[in-house]
Image (cartoon, rainbow, N blue to C red):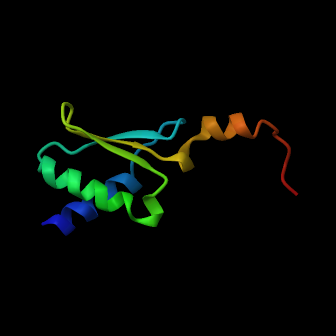
Amino acid sequence: MKDQTKSLLQEKIDKANYNTRGTANISIDGMNADEIKNVIQEIKNIPEYSSFSIDYNEETKTVNIINPGENIEGFEHTHPSRKACN
């Protein structure tokens, strides 16, 4: 069951609708809260997700994610030049 939850959560993270700041919220209503917390810790240890901030909000039953790779606004702020790369 835990592996199934982990696969499902990873799929939701990968397919999440990130905003321009690289944040997304995933509903996990109906899933076991303790299992989700354990799975999140495991996912954070996977190199592919190590730069992500992943937190579970028990009140709203959502997983809040910050993916630096999807942070368009931050990228534009740190790279203001719109010149083409050569």
Residue at the (32%, 53%) spot, across then down: 12
Residue 85, above or below 24: below
Q: Position of residue 43 (x, y in %)?
A: 34, 60
Residue at the (53%, 35%) spot, across then down: 21
Q: Is residue 16 left or right of residue 6?
A: right
Q: Position of residue 45 (x, y in %)?
A: 38, 62
Residue at the (54%, 36%) spot, across then down: 20
The residue lying toward the viewer, choosing from 64 and 29, is: 64
The residue lying toward the viewer, choosing from 70 and 40, is: 40
Q: Is residue 8 left or right of residue 44?
A: left
Quarter of the image that includes the C terminus: bottom right
Residue 41, above or below 66: below
Quarter of the image that includes the N terminus: bottom left
Residue extending farthest top: 59
Quarter where residue 28 is shown: top left
Q: Position of residue 63 (x, y in %)?
A: 29, 43
Residue 19, above or below 11: above
Q: Position of residue 73 (x, y in %)?
A: 62, 34
Residue 31 in sight in this render: no
The residue lying toward the viewer, choosing from 17 and 63, is: 63
Residue 86, above or below 54: below
Quarter where residue 50 is shown: bottom left
Q: Is residue 84 left or right of residue 44?
A: right
Residue extending farthest right: 86
Number of dots carrying numbers: 0
Residue 18 in sight in this render: yes
Quarter where residue 75 is shown: top right
Residue at the (39%, 43%) spot, across then down: 65
